[in-house]
Amino acid sequence: MSKILTIGREFGSGGRELGRRLSEELGIAYYDQEIIREIARRTSLSEQYVQAIAERKPTFSYPIHIGHSFYPSVNQPFEQTMGIYEEQTRIIRELAAKSECVIVGRCADYILRERHPFRLFVYADMESKIKRCREKGPEEERLSDKELKQKILGIDRRRAKYYGLYTGHAWGDKLNFDLCINTTRTVIKDIVPAIARLF
Amino acid sequence: MSKILTIGREFGSGGRELGRRLSEELGIAYYDQEIIREIARRTSLSEQYVQAIAERKPTFSYPIHIGHSFYPSVNQPFEQTMGIYEEQTRIIRELAAKSECVIVGRCADYILRERHPFRLFVYADMESKIKRCREKGPEEERLSDKELKQKILGIDRRRAKYYGLYTGHAWGDKLNFDLCINTTRTVIKDIVPAIARLF
């Protein structure tokens, strides 16, 4: 059975960087945005749209049909969201079957549970997440610390909802992970060799 | 500044074994029962008594004096417990100042926070904790799985109360640790070199 490493992460904690560096250190594949691209290709939806949907709770839209028809039409947004979830699950399973790899986010720890992946969770305190966001993203430049904090909390709230819906587990609960790494006082690249060795 | 490693752990998770092995790997001191022994020596209380008190919430005993005296006597059990806490804090600080070391439990992560120790938390699922307890302790032999689970939960509940009282933080909250290790699927000695490297 091939070795799989999954990474859950708080926004701004450096989980993505850790994943990328670990894949380089281990010489194995790295999947993150590639999954979105592949869903877009298979579903003929735009990458932007898939991205927006893929980490959000599906919306039930109740069609209003009274007086129009005896048959309620299919709940389109919900169906489409679920379709994207299903495609994502299929792709993650295919990728994991193909070769050893690192997969960031997307409930891969849960989707691949029968393969017993090594499950990492990466987190940090708010101050260091704000700092990391500022170092990374030019789009964060115009935001105040307070706005950036709201953005971080909002993204993680969506991740928690999505993870909860999909897995039935609490997002970030340490019992669902093999190792939880606090990157508050850490330079990511310095810890890569030791983590790779654990894996 | 000397390097300090503190270990919080769920009962039965193998945290103590990990601490001992890490100290051997790193060639630094290991403190656990030694702290209790030293408190007993300094306070002239028995080791058993200190052990019983040291990880328990202090009990307020309200003396009943009405009709006996105008002056309520000192709340003896509470004073003694607090005395043991203070002595423990002093000893932990002394030990950390003396040399690099591993300290298991006793809120050392909090007591030594100004020295920025590397803070580990070790945990596992209930099934593996029960298994580990059975492998270790002859005293657990007579207990059923249900009784052993109750014992584990009881000990951890006391640890959580003690930690909460002392530090004001939630026991086992990952944000108070640099690394949380799930030992459910782990052979402790196999992970020691990688953890030592992280430290």
Image (cartoon, coloured by chain):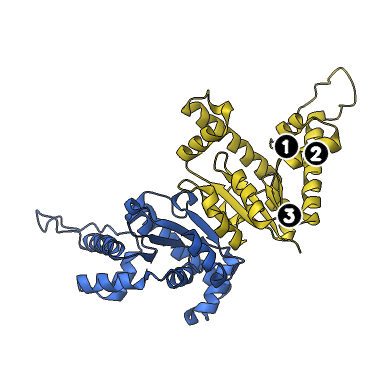
Chain colours: A blue, B yellow
Q: Which residue is mark 2?
A: B39
- Distance from disc 3 to disc 1, alpha carbons, whole Å, reads 17 Å
Q: Tell me the kind of residue under disc 2.
A: Ile
Q: Is residue B57 above or below residue B184?
A: above
Of all residues, the one furthest to the top in this rendering is: B67
Q: Earlier in the sequence, mark 3 or mark 1?
A: 1
Q: Are marks 2 and 1 in contact (CB under 8 Å)?
A: yes
Instruction: Name which residue lies at 80% across and 40% down.
Output: B38
Q: Secondary structure at mark 1?
A: helix
Q: Secondary structure at mark 3?
A: loop
Q: CA distance from mark 2 to mark 1?
A: 10 Å
Q: Are marks 2 and 3 in contact (CB under 8 Å)?
A: no
Determine which of the numbered discs, if any, sits on residue B54 in the image.
1
Residue type marked 3: Leu
Residue indicated by mark 3: B112
Above or below, B14 against A104 in this view is: above
* Residue A186 appearing in the image: yes
What chain letter is assigned to the residue under label 2? B
| Left or right: A1 as drawn, with respect to A6 | left
Do the residues marked 2 and 1 share a common chain? yes
Q: Position of residue A112 (x, y in %)?
A: 33, 56
Describe residue B8's horizontal placement relative to residue A103 as left or right. Answer: right
